[in-house]
Amino acid sequence: MLSRVADSLFWMARYLERAEHTARVLNVHLNLMLEQPAEASVGRWNRVRRVLGMDAAQLTLDDEAGALVRALSFDIANRSSIVSSIMSARDNARQVREQISSEMWEQLNRLFHEVRKADHVSEHDADSLDFLNAVKEGTHLFEGLADSTMSHGEGWQFIQIGRYIERAVNTAVLVNVHYADFADGADASDYLEWIGVLKCATAWEAYCKVYTATIDEHRVAEFLLLNPQFPHSLRFSVDCVRNAVASVAEMAPSGRSARLTRLAGRLKASLDFAQVEEVMHEGLAHFLEEARRQCIGLHTAIYQAYFRYPIESALEG
């Protein structure tokens, strides 16, 4: 597969996963505002900003919540915004139109026009939640169409790599930011916030099936980071990346993929054999930063192996 094609499929998936994650986090916190007194919102939007990687300097309005929600929804200059992410995903899909199914293209095109039609979102507008839900449902539908209408060859594997690297990084940052604020001395008033953390990873109901509705910060960390079966856990995401990397290496054998396969296997092993008690004792922040660093290393290795490599290597391969 041409490096240009693989690159576009990879980024198409990453941008759509980013849009879905942003919509979900905003949706959860807007709902929390409706369920809690105003004083409970202190610090919430600063956490949201940190979770979604937005610079505080970009917030210039007094209405912090409204400014943040609008910026993360519609600011084209912000690469993490929903509209910007979906536009970028569509641009990448258009460059590889022949590699994806007609159903995938039609759904992405439909989603693009839906988000472009929306002209405002605020923290007090009921339409805001409808908009965010439409983004989540639209990206989920696209993922389902990709899985059911596209051949599971190299192209599909690069979509998997992009989707799950983005998801792994998002989960690591989400857990790190919230634990930095809540893990020490959490009390009953934080109960809804812990539910919010789980809902930001679509994990609340799945968590309850494993641990019941009793909130324990160690169990939350264990579920979001180390559960091997939950699709948004860090371990599950890394497993998917490793499997996709191995599949691509089998389909297109090349010496360039050896380092990538080794890095993915190393990160997978570190999560497979981790114990939450050891992680918390040694420092959750350190563990998450190391996982995030290794994910960035995987991203770099993918570029070196498949997207940007010397022409001599390409000719030899």
Image (cartoon, rainbow, N blue to C red):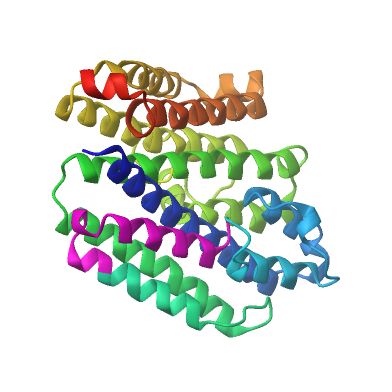
Residue 234's spot in the image, x, y percent? 46, 36
Left of 277 or right of it: where is 91? left
Residue ranking furthest to the right: 62
**Figure quadrant of residue 230:** top left
Q: Nearer the viewer, residue 260 or 167?
A: 260
Q: Does residue 216 appear in this view?
A: no
Left of 226 or right of it: where is 289? right
Image quadrant containing the N terminus: top left
> Predominant secondary structure in magenta?
helix
Highlighted magenta segment, given as a residue range: 80-105
Question: Is residue 92 on the magenta stretch?
Answer: yes
Left of 44 or right of it: where is 90? left
Q: How many marks?
A: 0
**Figure quadrant of residue 185:** top right
User: Residue placed at 58% from the left, 56% from the top?
Assistant: 80
Q: Nearer the viewer, residue 262 or 95?
A: 95
Question: Is residue 104 on the magenta stretch?
Answer: yes
Q: Does residue 54 appear in this view?
A: yes
Image quadrant containing the C terminus: top left
Left of 94 or right of it: where is 188? right
Residue 158's spot in the image, x, y percent? 29, 41
Residue 272's spot in the image, x, y percent? 39, 23
User: Residue placed at 65% from the left, 20% from the top?
Assistant: 281
User: Residue placed at 53% from the left, 82% from the top?
Assistant: 118
Residue 210's spot in the image, x, y percent? 41, 44
Q: Nearer the viewer, residue 202 or 153?
A: 153
